[in-house]
Amino acid sequence: MAERIVINGRYELDEHPLARGGMGEVWTGRDVRLDREIAVKFIRFPEGQPDADLTKRFVRESRLAARLQHPGVPAVHDAGTHDGRPYLVMQRIRGISVADLIAEQATLPIGWAAAITAQVCSVLAAAHSASLIHRDLKPSNLMIDGNGAVKVLDFGLAVAMDAADTSRITHTGQTLGTPSYMAPEQILGKASTAQTDLYSLGCTLYDMLTGRPPFNGPNHYTIMNKQVGERHRPVRELRADAPEGLERLLDALLDKQPERRPVGAQEVYATLLPYVEGLPPLPVLHPASQASPLRMYGTVIERMFALPSAPAGVAAAESRPAMQRTDVDAIRLRAEELMRNSRYGSAAELISGVMEPATRALGAADDDVISLRGLYANVLLDAGDFRPAARQFRQLARDLAERYGSDAEQVLDCRLQIARCHAMLGESSRALVQLNDLLADRQRIDGPDDPRTFELRRQIGLLQLGVGDNEAAGRTLQLLLEDLVNAFGPDHGEVVEVRNLLKNAAVR
């Protein structure tokens, strides 16, 4: 018998992996310290060699996934590296995947297809509000347990990759996502957004209703071409009992243009809910007559919110001493220490709790309060909470502009961070407008040959590459390359970097 792998002296893995994929592998095992079942998921590097940037991003996204508190997401217990490979320790889920359920049943009853999809919508609503995009939704990543509860697997693995990795992965023959469930913008190497997940959700719902995904073919290339260029066959041509409302929903979810898909998972959920009725028993489920603690819990919650709200009591105001400047300094130092240890969520929570009392005690225009607000915005950015970070940077920029003028360096820095937030949210067009406006001001204030101006032009080119606009990226980077050569010579490090980016644009 082969000797079992033990990670960190604690996680004992079974003899063989449970599953392998292009971007990782899953092992089952046991946490010997707490004596419980676990699943351990390793990420696979695109080129087979350790990648420091990918590892750092994986750790950050793992922390975000761990903060995603939802009954439809397996709990994240731990994260680390083993033999140079990043891993997540997850809650072990027992049940049947929706892919296996489809294989057994051929097609699912209308009510069950709607119920499963609606549960996934509730997970996506929570994830997207936290700026988490799954990027690999498909039937094999959905697990249904004996109570009919759905778990969405692989948050923390799929999210670890972004558009910047696409070219490297393409060179190694791997793909981000599964072609039969990938949105057109993913295939084209553009940024993923919440609407990308909704397209994949539409492919999954189509599969449950018809027994097959919207597009099939003999190889990945054929399927990808169909995802980008062909319209799916109307679901009612394959499933006559499918309601017209579900067909309309699928047509919206599978629209090739992300902006024409539903606004969010909540909208899809509301459309699906009326079809969650008349659910026949499935072989994988516990009988309805069998006592189930999970169903008992859900029934009570449902009844609680069906009752009229009780009058709320009036809480007594908590008496607190006024915050001192030394308190603000101590909190800032503690938050910075948490950030150094990548504990961004804890740092954000710490600062958030003192922002209002610090402002009340010292005043909104106080330098220490301004510094604390800037630190808070940066913590949110590092934590991946991009939308609230953008709001914080925007308000800070307005206040700083009133105090120092709109050309102040602090204001320009805030504007750059706002654009970064929108880029990370997948709002690339908005980010490009903001970056180009900022570039015009940088050139006016600092001149065309200032290093900050050059760096801003490089970031614009990178974003254009990330959204798949290679032609625009090529123009931006070529002009930048010529100006860098004139300023620093042909062998300067920045010249070499931009030259390599141009080669990348040509390949893609």
Image (spheres, rainbow, N blue to C red):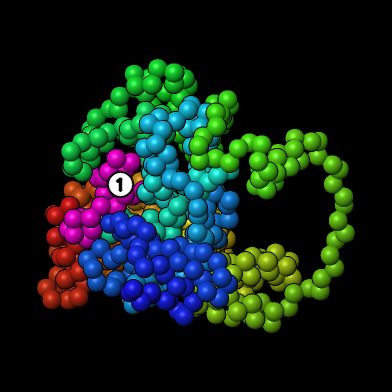
177 within the magenta span:
yes
Q: State whether residue 488 appears in this view.
A: yes
| Residue 213 rendering spot, x and y as whole percentages | 32, 34
Q: Amino acid at mark 1?
A: Thr
436 to the left or right of 316: left
Q: State whether residue 442 appears in this view.
A: no
- Label 1 CA crowd tier, 10 Å (few <14, some 14–19, many 20+): some
Instruction: Please say if 492 is above or below 414.
Output: below
Instruction: Please say if 115 is above or below 72.
Output: above
Q: Nearer the viewer, residue 115 or 123?
A: 115
Which residue, as the protein is rendered here, is positioned at the far front?
A: 1
Residue depicted at x 81% and y 74%: 321
| Residue 303 rendering spot, x and y as whole percentages | 75, 37
332 within the magenta span:
no
259 to the left or right of 294: left
Identify residue for label 1. 178
Q: Nearer the viewer, residue 341 or 363?
A: 341
| Residue 83 rendering spot, x and y as whole percentages | 33, 77
Segment colored magenta: 168-192
Total count of labels: 1
Residue depicted at x 37% and y 23%: 235
